[in-house]
Image (cartoon, helix red, strand yellow):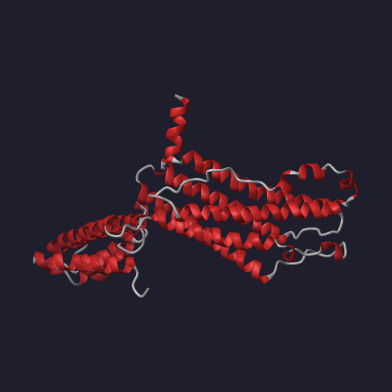
């Protein structure tokens, strides 16, 4: 698509703001589309944070401009302007300003150098038009093709799940493993293939993107977001993704010990079957996210199915032939099995939290208790 919905919404909102400002007959109406363009890009949570910063920076810059213009009139203009900007930097840091510095500094410089003859009217109109533009942008994000941070987080999580499917699918293939017994005992483990390594780096990048989006979701959900089911669901997804990415990375760094004996065959079959089950379950998660109704996706209706070979693994490990294996080989086998169990536990724990956060599930559970 040449023009996306978000871009079309931003253009229409900026045009509407400019038209309303022109119809009002008041000067400096061009600050309305400027505020819309600065705030209206992205999701509602991110725009809310930027809008708050922009208004706070405008108010602080206007207040310092009024005080500095009257109190520092006896000083040379460059020195007075520098002192006012330094005060803005100091007070802005105390108030937690981030992007608001630019707006406040722009007001101080423009007011001192350009609008000094009509300072009172310019400051009032500038603040009013800025607040109007921010409010117009936020209303468009909620009412006109709503853009929510939760939907963006879930879309990014779906992409992360797709990458995890590809990497775990590659790890489950016998051709992806390295025949360790064919090398000398003192040889170091071979590095992962460049393709698998690039997949792992992409997974880490997407995980960092999810973590950066969580504060925007918190802004969107209100004063106490940590008690909101959507925020806790995203937190559960992020924790599960972190454990899955860590397990995949460790599997790439610790290739399995290959052998032709029955023990090695059974263990690697169980490991491959579990990884394939993880791939299928991740696909089921993606399907649930794609078919979600409203803001909260439904959890899986059935528990995570374990393959038969993995459930019979305890009997395999009780075989007397296990004691004949070397210590180094047992360490490699144990490391791989622990990584598989880590991935399995991440899926099971995430689904347990997912089901507990489902609103209808909680209501049904409470009714059953009563």
Residue appearing at x 71%, y 61% in the figure: 253
Of all residues shown, which one is farthest toward the bottom?
A: 2
Rendering coords of residue 137 (x, y %):
26, 60
Q: Quadrant of residue 188?
A: bottom right
The number of discs equals: 0
Percent x, y for residue 354? 50, 44
Image quadrant where one finds the C terminus: top left
Relative to 338, 83 lies left or right: left
Is residue 108 shown to the viewer in this render? Answer: no
Q: 91 and 107: which one is in front?
A: 107
- Image quadrant of residue 38? bottom left
In this rendering, is residue 299 above or below 168? above
Task: Identify the residue shown where x is 64% and y is 59%.
Answer: 168
Q: Where's the N terminus, which quadrant?
A: bottom left
Q: Which residue is drawn at 18% across and 68% down?
A: 18
Left or right of 252, for residue 231: left
- Left or right: 24 as drawn, with respect to 4: left
Q: In the image, is 231 to the left or to the right of 123?
A: right
| Residue furthest top as drawn | 370
Can residue 43 be seen in this snapshot? yes
Quadrant for residue 86, please give it: bottom left
Residue 2, percent across and down? 36, 75
Q: Which residue is drawn at 20% across and 58% down?
A: 132
Looking at the picture, tell me which residue is in the foreground, 214 or 159. 159
């Amino acid at each position: 698509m040449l023009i996306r919905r978000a871009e079309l919404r931003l253009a229409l909102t900026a045009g509407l703001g400019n038209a309303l400002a022109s119809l009002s007959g008041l000067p400096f109406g061009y600050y309305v589309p400027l505020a819309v363009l600065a705030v209206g890009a992205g999701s509602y949570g991110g725009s809310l944070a930027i809008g708050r910063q922009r208004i706070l920076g405008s108010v602080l810059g206007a207040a310092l401009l009024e005080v500095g213009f009257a109190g520092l009139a006896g000083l040379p203009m460059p020195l007075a302007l520098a002192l006012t900007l330094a005060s803005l930097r100091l007070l802005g840091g105390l108030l937690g300003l981030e992007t608001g510095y630019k707006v406040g500094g722009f007001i101080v410089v423009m007011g001192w150098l350009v609008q000094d003859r009509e300072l009172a009217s310019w400051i009032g109109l500038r603040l009013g038009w800025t607040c109007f533009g921010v409010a117009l942008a936020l209303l468009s994000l909620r009412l006109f093709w709503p853009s929510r941070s939760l939907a963006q987080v879930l879309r990014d999580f779906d992409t992360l799940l797709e990458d995890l499917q590809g990497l775990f699918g590659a790890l489950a293939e016998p051709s992806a493993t390295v025949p360790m017994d064919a090398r000398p005992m003192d040889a170091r483990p071979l590095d992962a293939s460049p393709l698998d390594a690039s997949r792992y780096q992409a997974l880490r990048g997407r995980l960092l993107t999810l973590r950066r989006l969580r504060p925007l979701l918190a802004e969107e959900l209100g004063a106490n977001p940590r008690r909101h089911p959507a925020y806790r669901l995203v937190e559960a997804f992020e924790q599960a993704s972190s454990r899955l990415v860590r397990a995949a990375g460790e599997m790439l760094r610790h290739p399995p010990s290959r052998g032709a004996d029955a023990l090695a065959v059974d263990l690697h079959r169980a490991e491959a079957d579990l990884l394939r089950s993880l791939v299928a379950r991740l696909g089921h998660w993606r399907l649930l996210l794609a078919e979600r109704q409203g803001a909260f996706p439904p959890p899986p209706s059935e528990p995570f199915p374990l393959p038969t070979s993995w459930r019979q693994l305890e009997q395999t490990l009780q075989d007397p032939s296990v004691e004949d294996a070397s210590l180094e080989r047992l360490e490699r086998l144990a490391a791989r099995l622990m990584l598989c169990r880590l991935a399995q536990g991440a899926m099971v724990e995430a689904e347990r939290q997912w089901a507990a956060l489902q609103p209808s599930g909680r209501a049904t559970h409470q009714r059953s208790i009563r």
